[in-house]
Image (tube, rainbow, N blue to C red):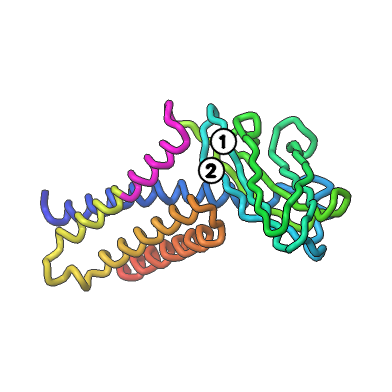
Amino acid sequence: MNKKSRFILALIVFGVGFTIGLIFNTQAVWTDLEGMSFWGYPEATSFDQSIEIDGELSPLQCPVLITSHEVATVKIRVTNKTDNQINPWLQASISKPGERDSLVRHKQELILAPRETKTMSWEVSNENTLLNRSIFVRTFLFKIENYPPSLTRHCGIMVRDFGSLTGTQIILLVVISSLVLMGVGWWLWWSNLVPMRRRENRVVMILGFMFALNTISFVSNLMGNLVISGFALVLTALSLIAIVETFAYHRN
């Protein structure tokens, strides 16, 4: 294999790994974004963030992906940030086809001692899947039962099947194959260069930058951080546009 062919092979291997990661991260971010519009009525119109409440909600702990054969657990922590006992109400709205607003509500009163934190959980499965691809969960915290909700958290869960693999196994397969292929592609390009030109080669730096962006996207999606994962995805898109425009400019 001549030198030009090795460079082409390096870009192909890197590109396959990058595409795998880009598809996964895009779908993960999109599912979370769809979850932002999952509210239900009357919560969508009655929600009032200006109502003071002594409770505090952590981010929802949701799996990024499950299969249609799995049952997953969604968790959230509710904290009393005062020195007095409080009795807030917590509601979990979970997607379910065929129900009104395509969701079911689980609402309960909590008794929280001063500075106490309680972890609440609910199970989700294929019966909660909308359009055969996503499960949505939104929690609300009420000061008292008949008040409008004043705190909310949400998450979206992808539902995908790949053979007999579990959701965790699918995620590991995607992350490992993507990063390994990108790393191999970068190494093939780097090792094909003259040693003195390796540090200043632009392609090496670009591939390294895209590898870093993909890694950040994976980590932030797995941690449930929509802000960072969304920012990394936008930066990835802008970088791809810049690369294409630069390539087109130099060809002309």
Residue at 48 percent of width and 59 percent of height: 233
The C terminus sits in image quarter = bottom left
Query: Which residue position is annotated with label 2?
Result: 63
The amino acid type, in three-letter code, at marker 2 is Pro
Query: Which residue position is annotated with label 1?
Result: 72
Q: Is residue 164 magenta?
A: yes
Relative to residue 36, is residue 126 depicted above or below?
above
CA separation, marks 1 and 2? 7 Å
Residue at 48 percent of width and 56 percent of height: 220
The amino acid type, in three-letter code, at marker 1 is Ala
x then y, percent, for residue 241: 43, 64
Observer-nearest of 144 and 65? 144
For the record, the magenta segment spans 162-179
Q: Is residue 215 magenta?
A: no
Residue at 32 percent of width and 65 percent of height: 206
Disc 1 element? strand
Left or right? Give the position of 42 relative to 83: right
Give the quadrant of residue 120: top right
